[in-house]
Image (cartoon, helix red, strand yellow):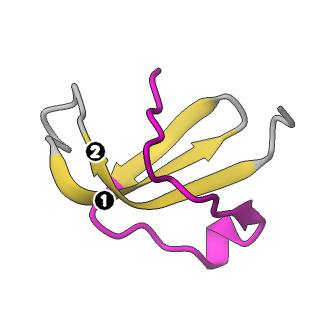
Amino acid sequence: MDGDQRILLRGGSVVSMDPAIGDLARGDVLIVGDRIAGAGESLPGEGNHANFCTPEQRQLIVDR
């Protein structure tokens, strides 16, 4: 995967080990390169993240 590629997963269930984020019934996950760069209820899809793709995330599990 390209080190600068951004993938924004929107509207999925997020189970996080980070107590600052917690578990979200509906949230977004931003992946940059091979790293999870952010997670939250509503991540911006423009500005800093202008070059991203948003794939279908149903039944997708992202594990770090």
Task: Give the residue at x 81% y 35%.
Answer: 3
Query: Which quadrant would the N terminus be assigned to in this image?
Result: top right
Q: Residue furthest top?
A: 64
Residue linked to disc 2: 14
Label 2 packing within 10 angstroms: few (<14), some (14-19), many (20+) = many
- The kind of residue on which mark 1 rests is Gly
| Residue 19 percent location from the top left of the image | 13, 33
Segment tinted magenta in the rendering: 40-64
Q: Is residue 36 magenta?
A: no
| Residue 42 percent location from the top left of the image | 34, 70
| Residue 59 percent location from the top left of the image | 43, 43
Task: Work out whether 2 lies above or below 42.
Answer: above
Label 1 packing within 10 angstroms: few (<14), some (14-19), many (20+) = some
Label of residue 3 in the image: none
Q: Is residue 41 left or right of residue 59?
A: left
Q: Residue 27 sits in which quadrant? A: bottom left
Task: Give the residue at x 64% y 68%.
Answer: 48
Q: Main secondary structure of the magenta part?
A: loop
